[in-house]
Amino acid sequence: MSRGRAGRRAGLVAGLALLLLGASAGPAAAHAIGTGTEASNYRTGIRGIDQGVPGISVRTVAGEQLELTNRSGQEVVVLGYRLEPYLRIGPGGVYENQRSPSTYTNRFRAAPTEIPPEFDPAAPPEWRRVGDGPSAAWHDHRAHWTGPDPPAVKANPRASHVIVPDWRIPVSQGEHDDEHDDEHDMVIRGDITWVPGPSPWPWALAAVALFAAALAAAGGYRRPKVLAVVALVAVAADMIHTAGALLASTAPLATELYGTVTSAAGWAVAGFAAWRLLRGRADTGLLYLLLGGVFLTLAGALPDLSSLGRSQLASGFGPIVTRAAITFTLGLGTAMVVAGLAGFRSPRRAEKAGVS
């Protein structure tokens, strides 16, 4: 290999490595199931709405968020942690009170200890439109668990435990003033239950088996066309994983797109690697295979590795499909990295393999 070609290859590796480090810092963390929603063993359950009216329903989405749908024709207001107006949901869309302490608190997975003074429960509401439809989903600290595991769970983690038997969120409908009282009060009620997850070891062993099978079928790096198939299957698995997360996500479109940037980069790089390998260009194909495998492993599999042993996953495709997609991405993505490293360390042999 000429010095000039070696220098260009080294520059390409350095440039793509820098791109990987810069692109994966934020989006890789955001990719975890549901673009930010973490897998857990705490199930948020809804028992119903006290004094509910026709057209109003509540369900859990994205694993632990609440979604209220109001088709009653009359606006409802969800009250915050200090009983201040927090959300308005009705025919005119969804509005969030920008002065509500709950608006600030719900930006964080764990409730902050301090709230800035501009978020005042006694201040007149300042409503900002945040949605067009009759439904609003939000992260409510009253309805999910973020603290340490309770003593009952620590004592027997393999059994189910009701952690919070009766959480409540007040909702009002109509208007209330000194002369007229047309307000109707409702209460959303539910519980939080610890549900043990499956053993992660069968999935981990399956990932190891996929890794070994892929390298054996490819002869390490000597069968480029087999590696091309490995790359395409890994991309398909991560696409399924990402699609399931997006189907369950309630995040804005911009947030969802940001959360998939690194995975999409991995799809593109791995797809290009497969194209080069299928054309018999193993010299550059193995390089892109290595980089595509790093993208898929770091952004597609490792952030969601805990999902293999958790019971509550936010995915539109269900837990079995989600765990299988993560397992395929992990096993085949790691095989891509190893094969790419082996071929990159022996470029002359890689070139010969590409024309054999």
Image (cartoon, rainbow, N blue to C red):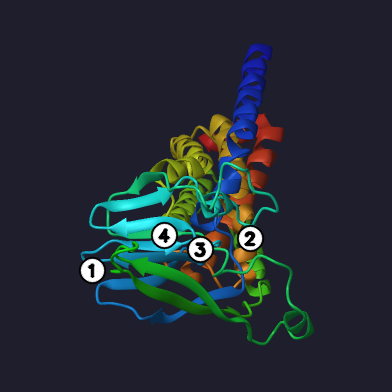
- Label 2 vs label 4: CA separation? 26 Å
Label 2, label 3: how many angstroms apart (C-alpha)? Answer: 38 Å
Circles 3 and 1: CB atoms closer than 8 Å = no
Dot 2 or dot 4: first in sequence order is 4
Give the left or right position of residue 206, taking residue 182 as reference.
right
Between marks 3 and 4 in the image, the one whose residue lies nearer the viewer = 3
Q: Left or right: 352 with respect to 76?
A: right
Question: Residue visible at 52% across and 66% down?
Answer: 64
What secondary structure is marked by label 1? loop
The mark found on residue 83 in the picture is 3
**Precedes in sequence: disc 1 or disc 4:** 1
**Label 3 to label 1: alpha-carbon separation:** 22 Å
Gap in angstroms between the C-alphas marked 1 and 4: 17 Å
Q: Which residue is mark 4?
A: 137
Question: In the structure shown, which secondary structural element does the residue marked by tag 2 occupy?
Answer: helix
Foreground disc of the pair 1, 2: 1
Q: Tell whether label 4 touches label 3 (CB within 8 Å).
A: no
> In the rendering, which numbered label is found on residue 72?
1
Is residue 160 placed above or below 297 in the rendered structure? below
Q: Amino acid at mark 2?
A: Leu
x and y percentages locating residue 353 in the rendered image: 58, 38
Q: Compared with residue 176, is residue 299 higher up or lower down, i.e. above or below?
A: above
Say which amino acid is labelled 4: Ala
Residue designated by label 2: 305
